[in-house]
Each structure stands twice: as structure tokens, then as C-alpha cells.
Amino acid sequence: MSFDRTTSQILFDNGTHKCISFTSLVKGEGIQANQFLIIDHDRAAVLDPGGDLTYVPLTMELNRYTKLKNLDYVMASHQDPDIITSMPRWLVYTDAKIVASKLWARFLPHLNSAFMSDRMKGNWEERLIELPDTGQVIPLGESSIVVVPAHFLHSVGNFQFYDPTAKILFSGDMGASIVEDASLPITDFEAHIKKMKGFHQRYMCSNKVIRLWVNMVRQMDLDMIVPQHGTAFVGKEMINQFLDWIENLECGVDLMNEYVFSIPTEIN
């Protein structure tokens, strides 16, 4: 495992409000994943912080921009290991509240060992904000983060985080891509499709859900869509190209058939 201290990018900074992306803090193990920090008037939130592999390098990076005592929230788009398995450490070493779907609230305690539970600051239930299916507005400093529904894209209880100050949608797995360097901008959308298509066809539930999501996103004032894996979509033209493409993609149950649901006959 190696740490890379050149991977933070400031996505937005107006003096009192900042959004920072960390694209490859850990290299060589596990899938590439992005983590995010939002700061407003010295209050902070971390989005999709990842697991144990990421915790140490991420906290080192956070200390470059803020103090851990200023961290109000650790927000999880869904329950996957690359999203929130570091949760016990945040509960022990910070006063932050965990923001997650109400559907996953009963499962998250399974991440805690008895050792971590004994060291935790405060009661678990008091530090959990359970999101209703319709989403919620979370205050941060003098601004807010709008948690918007993205169910079945790909998790049954899935959310995304819209920062109306920065005009950024942190989109979780929607828009994810497999790239060598997630910090490099997309210059050719058509060429970028091959880095997204297979993932979205397998991990997204259906075109019906995608179209519902696209209709919601088109109502937002956006300058960026920033996924949890791979490269961001920067600028309204690139965002619209992505929305136009994904809106028509068949995926998930759309592609299931009898061949997939057949009984294996050979021993591998």
C-alpha cells in the first residue's frame, strides 16, 4: 500500500465555502475511489470516506484543510465497503454524526467491534441521522447539503449529495468510470463511454430508474457531476452529454434473460 499526497483537488473555493476531492489516496489495492470534503465557514462534512485502507491517508489530507474537531458529518451514499466501512474510526476519533439511509441504519452497527463500541464518543443512535427515502436538507455552517434520492443506482437505499453553493452533484456510483488517473478531465465524451458502459449496465437497476433520476437532475443548477469512481463531468455541455447518454441506456434487469438464469452444468 502506498500513499499519494498529490491527489487532492479543490473543486470549488469562494473564500468561505470549499469542496475538495481526493482521487487516489491509496494505490495498488482495491478499486479506485474518490473521497470528498465540503467546508463552509469552518464546519466540515466528509462524503463516502471509504474503508480502513483509506482512513489514515484521508485524515492526513483532511488536516491540510480543516481540523477533525470541525467535522460535523460523515455522509454515506450507501453501505458498500468502499463507502463507509471506516465508520467505527470516525465515531471513535471525531464527534461527527453519520448520515445514511434509514434502510441501512440497522446494518451499520455490524461494522463496529466491541473494542470500538467501548471507545465510541456518545451513544450510537444519537450519532446517526437516518435519511428518509425522500432525502433531506442537512445544514452545514451557513450553507446546506441537499441529500437527494438515487435509489437502485445501484443500492436499494441510495443517496447523492447536492451542494447548491458549489453547484456540484456528488453522484456516488452514477457516472462512475474505470480510468488510470481520475484527476484528468474528460476531453472526448464518446471515447469515455467505453470506460463507463459495462459498469452501468451491470450495477444500475433499470432504465426506468435512470430516467427518473435524469429528470430530477435536469432540474438542478449544476456545474459539475462528480462520481465516487473515476472522472468528473465538468461544465454544462459535458453534463448534458452524460445525461443524454445514460437516459437511453438499458441496464440491470433490462438485460436479464433465461440464459443468465440457467442452472450450471459444469464444474470449473
Image (cartoon, helix red, strand yellow):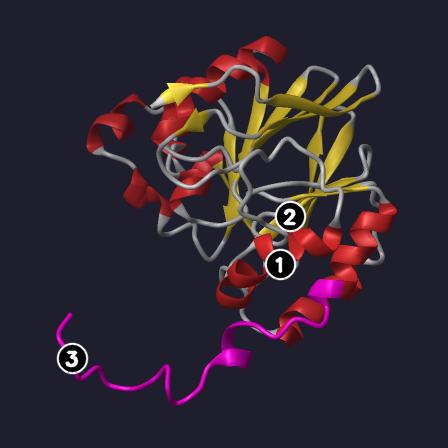
Instruction: Name the residue that disc number 1 marks.
Output: 150
- Which of the two marks, 2 or 3, is nearer to us in this view? 3
Instruction: Name the residue that disc number 3 marks.
Output: 266
Q: Do the residues labelled 1 and 2 touch (CB within 8 Å)?
A: yes
Specify the farthest residue to the left: 267
Q: What stretch is highlighted in magenta?
A: 245-268
Task: Give coordinates of residue 139: x percent, y percent.
Answer: 71, 33
Amino acid on which the number 3 mark rests in the picture = Glu
Q: In this view, does 210 lie to the left or right of 164?
A: left
Which residue is depicted at the point 53% across and 37% down? 180
Task: Give coordinates of residue 159: x percent, y percent.
Answer: 60, 52
Determine the main secondary structure of the stretch shown in magenta. loop
Task: Give coordinates of residue 57: x percent, y percent.
Answer: 44, 19
Mark 3, secondary structure of its residue: loop
Amino acid on which the number 1 mark rests in the picture = Ala
Mark 1, secondary structure of its residue: loop
Instruction: Name the residue that disc number 2 marks.
Output: 171
- Which of the two marks, 1 or 2, is nearer to us in this view? 2
